[in-house]
Amino acid sequence: MFTGIVEAKGLISKKIPSTEGQRLQIEVPEGFNKDLKEGASVAVNGVCLTVTEYSNDQISFDVIKETLRVTNLGDLNKNSEVNIERSLKFGDEVGGHLLSGHISCACKASLSNTEGEVEILVDKPENWGQYIYPKGYIALNGVSLTVGKVSDESFSVYLIPETIRSTNLLTVEDGARLNLEIDQGIMASYENEKNTLKNIGEDE
């Protein structure tokens, strides 16, 4: 599990094709790998990946083809900046909201920066749009965010200065894809309510 509070930004140092998909090597800041172990989970742009190798300033992951299809990890190049977060430990503070690291989909986005207000406009995914509503939680590239405006075609989030400083969201280019994870609590509540209404209708 993760919190959606990005700990650091890493740089992709190598992308090596493999039979299963791709070997991804990421350069990380000093201290990020302290007490890290092989087999540990790390969120990379919100994607839960398993550590296969590491050194003082590098981590390697094996990314399978399905993960490359569903997320934006396959879109990235050498020296692309990624958000990274170590997995949540018992007793840690949850500053954002609980995330599984299982990406719902990758959505096209664009950035607007006008009069000091930084907004990311995201294409609403057809299969997941019902779970996105104003003031609800979502995660983009592993960043816990509150939904701003919602329309039939899109939704937006607004970035505070700390989010701009500590994440890669300000590097979004028009048409770039961001990894979206729907809040599991919201999704469960929606489905429970839908099932309850369905049962009431069947009983009448």
Image: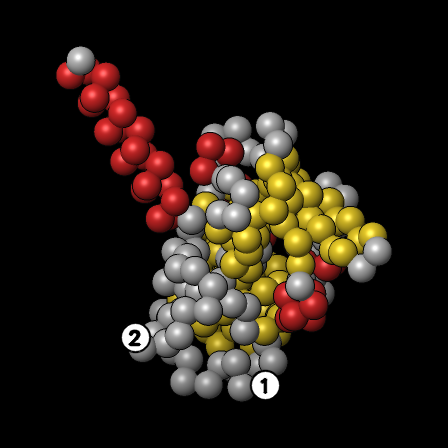
Name which residue lies at 35% across and 48% down.
185
The residue carrying mark 1 is: 30
Q: In this view, does 35 lie to the left or right of 166?
A: left
User: Callout 1: few (<14), some (14-19), or many (20+) C-alpha neighbours within 10 Å?
Assistant: few
CA gap, disc 1 and disc 2: 24 Å
Is residue 19 or residue 183 the one in the foreground? 183
> Mark 1 falls on what kind of element?
loop
Name the disc covering residue 110, or none.
none
Label 2 sits on a secondary structure element that is: loop
The mark that comes first in sequence, 1 or 2, is 1
Q: Position of residue 124 (x, y in %)?
A: 58, 35
State whether residue 22 appears in this view. no
Q: Which residue is drawn at 20% across and 23% down?
A: 199
Q: Nearer the viewer, residue 76 or 82?
A: 82
Count of numbered circles in the view: 2
Residue 64 lies left or right of residue 74; in this view the side is left
Does 202 sit above or below residue 99?
A: above
Query: What residue is rendered at 21% in x and 21% in y?
Result: 200
- Where does the N terminus fall, quadrant-wise? bottom left
Quarter that holds the C terminus = top left
Residue 177 placement (x, y as % from top left): 64, 45
Which of the two residues, 125 or 54, is positioned nearer the viewer here?
125
Residue 186 visible to an observer of this rendering:
yes
- What's the amino acid at mark 2? Phe
Residue occupying image coordinates x 35% and y 36%: 190
Q: Which residue in the rendered view is the most extreme toward the front? A: 204
Q: Mark 2 points at which residue?
A: 90
Residue furthest top in the image: 204
Residue 155: horizontal and vertical position, in percent? 61, 39
In the current view of this chain or complex, which residue is farthest to the left?
A: 203
Name the front one of labels 1 and 2. Answer: 2
Q: Position of residue 7 (x, y in %)?
A: 54, 73
